[in-house]
Every structure is written in structure tokens, then in C-alpha cells.
Image (tube, grey):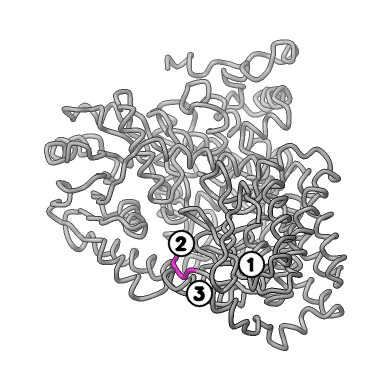
Amino acid sequence: MAEYQHWKLDTDKDNILWLTIDRAGKSTNSLSREVFDEFDKIIDGIDENKISGVVIRSGKKKGFIAGADISQFLDLKTEDEAFDLIRQAQIVLDKFEALSVPTVAMISGFCLGGGCELALACRYRVADEHPSTKIGLPEVKLGIHPGWGGTVRLPRLIGPMKAMNIMLPGRALLARNAARMGMVDVAVPKRQLERAARYYILQKPKPYVMKWYECLSNVAFVRPWLAKIFYKKLSAKVDRHHYPAPFAIVKGWVRDNDKNKAMIAEAKSIAKLMVTETARHLVRVFFLQDRLKGLAKGADFSPKRVHVIGAGTMGGDIAAWCALRGFHVTLQDQTAEQIAPAIKRAYQLFKKKLKRPHLVQATMDRLQPDITGLGVRSADVVIEAIFENLEVKQTLFRTLEPQLKSDAILATNTSSIPLSEIATALQKPERLVGIHFFNPVAMMPLVEVVRGEQSSNDVLANAMAFVGKIGKLPLPVASKPGFLVNRILMPYLMESMVLLEEGVSPCTIDKAALDFGMPMGPITLADKVGLDVCLSVAEKLSSHFGGVVPERLKTMVADGRLGVKSGRGFYQYKKGKPVAEKAKGTGKASKDITDRLMLRMLNESVACLHEAVIEDADLLDAGMIFGTGFAPFRGGPIHYAKHRGYAEIVVRLQALADQYGERFKPYVGWENFVSSAELKDVPSGEDRLASQGL
């Protein structure tokens, strides 16, 4: 056979074609039009060369196939262009599926999206059982759905109930779970993977077949009944107008029973979605995430040991997460009794994430209590996570510095104290950096990497590399009050408190935010974070930036109504779960409430850009999406302002300022987005910062 740019072909003594995908010029495999063109030619040569079977494997060090090359979506202008791109790949995979010889996908590492769809076109699938192997169809997270036959092949392979449970949320399965579902034929240790692939080619066992009751669920007259269940579950989790893709999956499955017609309908459906604003914004978010991941690759730093000081909720959970990600971790506090709850929480996390007892035990062995702090001397990364008291932190850092390895990172998890103040206790202040996690640590993907006035570039680069190695997204921010995420989030939360004082019900306020696309309303969020924490942050930020902390918040904290952790905040809770309440209050116009909440965030976002808290608007958007869940389909605060119209936002802010007060005045910085001609009828915003001498 001919030589190819993206594929390597080898035939062994059994006449098995080992077809290796090795995308030229890329660190991971992705599927593009050029890759499919070559694959098409290879398929044509298989029958001509009398091959006994085909095994598809990866030539990359990491992963099988990550999915489609998302960059090719950016140039699509019309549905017809999108349909042609999708249909070309469908036809190639249909041809591959129709080969008379057995075909095997040999999966190790990620097998996602289009990569999974290619695997589904094979007769068999064998997978490496290592936890790094993830198999799934996450396309809904890009505002689209599987388009290369995934919505057709997967329900026919494992049944619609299991298939929808994978496709609708965009889940990725571990290999063993995929094998139990029938999505792969066998999960084996990596050393046995090639042997398993050879077995399926030479022995040709019967492929996986659904149970009889699973087959019934694919019958045409049953589908509409099942669809009602799928729609109901979806509607409880997402808004159809915000995220139409999962609803389109169900609609396509119900409508088309004939395979060829279903394929064409799938291509038409995804083509329509690919040119929507939702998909374009979510694709942008995908690239923002890639940019954050790229920031973690700027240094050749390979830490092995982490020492965490402070076994409270944050410190303990940081230590547990680092151990889960393969680090040897020592966790220090004053007594064993103070460390014990953190070890208990860590064990629960490991059981949930790892499942298998020997893996849980191995991870527990990497997490060691350390009352005396001996772990400092051997640590590559030392993270301070004690309570927010400057003098106590300074005393601690004076003690730590002489014990550190020369190249160790010295980090603080402070959320409110400027690094320059902590650094006065150090002989080498340039080695101090902020590594600010968000709660809950295991769930929040973002970590702010905070540069102090004296932090060295090498230390910052190493800190971002460390954040990447623990599977988080690093966001570089300046050491200014609140950093980025908390500073932008706090006006949003405080405005919700003002609305409460005006008589608007918590349910009405939360609904306005949910309708906008936020993952939860601000009142629910405040209860989850803890009203005492909200009050502390609000008081600290208001001391820097002005503003009034709502009296109701102070009163509730004084009364012990702290939110979920106390069983009562703005809502009531039982065993951590909310108790349903009837909406009460005035129920003001939702649009007015929404603008009051969201435009305060936008105003603060522009102020942060103006003060260089963050390097640029894209990083700000990424920080708010991955740090707060800011409606991803809107692309982030600044992107939303651009889409809605910068001038319109400024006009609206001024109108809100006239009606509700100075806190809505457009901050300095909007002039970077809006020309004076556009604002000729808008009164200029007051420079809040200059007026306070900041």
C-alpha cells in the first residue's frame, strides 16, 4: 500500500493490517477531512490486498483519538458547508463498517467524540483498563451532538437507555464500565492489549448483542414513550433554549428507524447546530480551556512531593486531591485530632473516584499526617492553607523558609491577603506565589496562580506547571484584593442581597439567574459557600472598593444561619439537601432582576481588565466560566457584553445607576470597548478607583 501522512500501515505474518493513526504535526490524534481522505483510500486497498483483519491503534504516546479537529468548525459559515463536512466522514465510516474482514479498535487512553465514533464503526473494541482510558461522546459540551454515526450506532449496540445515559450528559466511561455496558468487548491490562486485538481478528467471536429487553426499547412504537422520559429528565437539568443539542439527540432517535435515513438526519441535525451561537460560543470555550492547559506547559518542572499546612476544609481537600493525582503528600496541623477529619474526607473521595480497594489503599498510603512538619524539607511544593491572619502567616513563613529545598515552590492559598504583605517575612520574597483553590476542591477545575509584586517569572511558571500536573486549569492573576473570581462574583452576590432587602423572594432571584444560564442562583450559591464566608469576603472587599454590606447578611450570620452547613440560611436544608419552599415576595420583572445581577458582574469585569488583574479579556472569560460556571453558552462576561453590544451595556448601566444608585455607574475601562461617538448620549461613568485614591 502507499505511504500516507497521517497513517502508518504494517502487515504481520497472519496478514493482519495494523493501522496506526499518527496525526502529523499534532501531539494528539484528531480527525480532520485530510485524515478521512487518507483513511478512505486505505479502506479501498484492504480488499485488494486480501487482508485477514484490521486493527486500528494510536501512534501517539498519549491517547487513542481525542475526537474531531475542532479548528475545522471555525470556518463553517452555513448549514450546507457543515453538512458536507459531516457527511463525508459518515460515508467513509460506513464503508469501513461494511468491510467483510473483522476490524478492531485497540484503545489506550482517551477515546472521545469522533474517535469513539470511529471505534463504534469497528466490529470489535478492546481497551486498556488503566484509569487514564476514557471512552465517550462529549459533543453536547460543544453545543452539538455526535455526527459521525454515534447517535445511530450506540443505541443499536447497547440499547437507548444506556446510550442516552452516555450521550445526553456527554459522559466519558472508564474502560471497565464501558465493557460492562457492552460499549467495548473487553478491558484488559495494557500489556495484554495487542494479544486481545489479535484474538478478536483471528478467532472472530460473536460481537456483543443486547439483551432481549434492550432490543425492545429500540422498537419504533416504543421510542416515543421512552422519549418522554428522556425529555423530562433533560428538562429538569438544562434549558432547551440554552442547550438544544441533547434534545436533538432524542428527537433524531425517535424519528428515524432506518439506518441510512438516520445517518443523513443526524448529519442535518448537527449541521444545523454547528452554526448556532450556542455552538460557536461553546467551541470558543473549548479553545479557552486549551489555552489554560497550555499555560501549564511553560516550564520543565516535575514535582513529586507536596506539603500542605492546615488541615481544615481547604487544606485537607487540597492535600487529598494532590494524593489522588499521584503525589506523595504530607499534611500538617497542630494535632492528630485536627488532621483526622481531613484523612476521613480523603478516604471517601478516593473510594468515590477510584472504586477498587487496592487503588484506594495505594492512594491513602501517599497521604501522610505530619504533626511536626518534617515533610517540608523534602517537598517540591509547600502550600499554606491556614486561617486568614497576616501575622500568623508571616510567622509561619519565617519558620518555613530556612527549611525549604532551593527549588521548592512556596505558595499560599490566601483569598484576601496581598502577597506583598506576606512576603515581607521572607529573605527571598521572589519565591512566594499564590495558588488559590476554590471550594469544593475536587469539583472546581480552576486554580488562580497569583503573582505578587516580587514573584519571579520562573516561580510563576513552575506554579502553573504544578497546577496542570494535578489536573486543574491555571489562571494567572495579579495579587490585588479578591484576585479575579471572588472580586467579580461578590457584586453579583451582594446585589442579590439588596434585592432580598427590597422584598424580592429568594426563588425569584435564583430563577432570574438560572434563566440567564448560571448553574445555580446567587442565593443558593451563598448558602452553599457559607454566609459567614460571604460576609468575611464582602467586608474585606468593601474596605478596598467601597460599597455597603447588606445588614440582613450580618444579622443572619450573627444568628447562626450560615447556609447549608448550619441547616438554614436563606433556604432550609435537611441532611445537606434543600427543603422545598413556596416563592414569596414582590416578584419584580425578571429582566430587571437579571440585569441588576449580571451587569454588576460585567462592570466589575471591565474594572479588573482596566487594573490589569488579568492579562486579557479571553483569560477573564475563561476564569469566570471555569471558576464560577458563568453561563458557558454565552462565552464569558466580556464575550457576552460584546455579543449584546458594549454601548448597550453602558447605557443600561447608567439607567440602572439613575434608578438604583451609584454602584451601577459604568467604571473606567468601558472606553476601551466603546467609542466616544457611541456614548455621546451616555453620561460618563464615575472613576470609583480614582475617587478613592486607589
At label 2, counting other C-alpha atoms closer than 10 Å, the crowd grade (few under 14, some 14-19, many 20 or more) is some
Q: Residue 443 in the image: x percent, y percent? A: 47, 55
Residue 341 is drawn in which quadrant? bottom left
Q: Distance between the residues labelled 3 and 1?
A: 18 Å
> From the viewer's perspective, is the residue at label 3 or at label 1 nearer?
3
Residue 92 is drawn in which quadrant? bottom right
Q: How far apart are marks 3 and 2 (CA)?
A: 13 Å
List the residue tagged with mark 3: 187
| Quadrant of the image containing the N terminus | bottom right
List the residue tagged with mark 2: 132
Q: Main secondary structure of the magenta part?
A: loop
Please state which of residues 499 and 471 is positioned toward the viewer in this rendering: 471
List the residue tagged with mark 1: 166
Q: Could you tell me the amino acid type at mark 1?
A: Ile
Vertical comparison of 228 with 458: above or below? below
Left or right: residue 550 versus residue 306 is right
Segment tinted magenta in the rendering: 128-132
Left or right: residue 68 versus residue 620 is right
Please state which of residues 429 and 20 is positioned toward the viewer in this rendering: 20
Vertical comparison of 591 with 530: above or below? above
Judge whether residue 65 can be spotted in this image.
Answer: no
Q: Quick check: is 277 in the magenta stretch?
A: no
Q: Could you tell me the amino acid type at mark 3?
A: Ala
> From the viewer's perspective, is the residue at label 2 or at label 1 nearer?
2
Q: Could you tell me the amino acid type at mark 2?
A: Ser
| Quadrant of the image containing the C terminus | top left
At label 1, counting other C-alpha atoms closer than 10 Å, the crowd grade (few under 14, some 14-19, many 20 or more) is some
Of all residues, the one furthest to the bottom in this rendering is 212
Residue found at x 74% / y 57%: 147
Along the polypeptide, which appears first: circle 2 or circle 1? 2
Q: Residue 232 carries which label?
A: none
Element at label 1:
helix
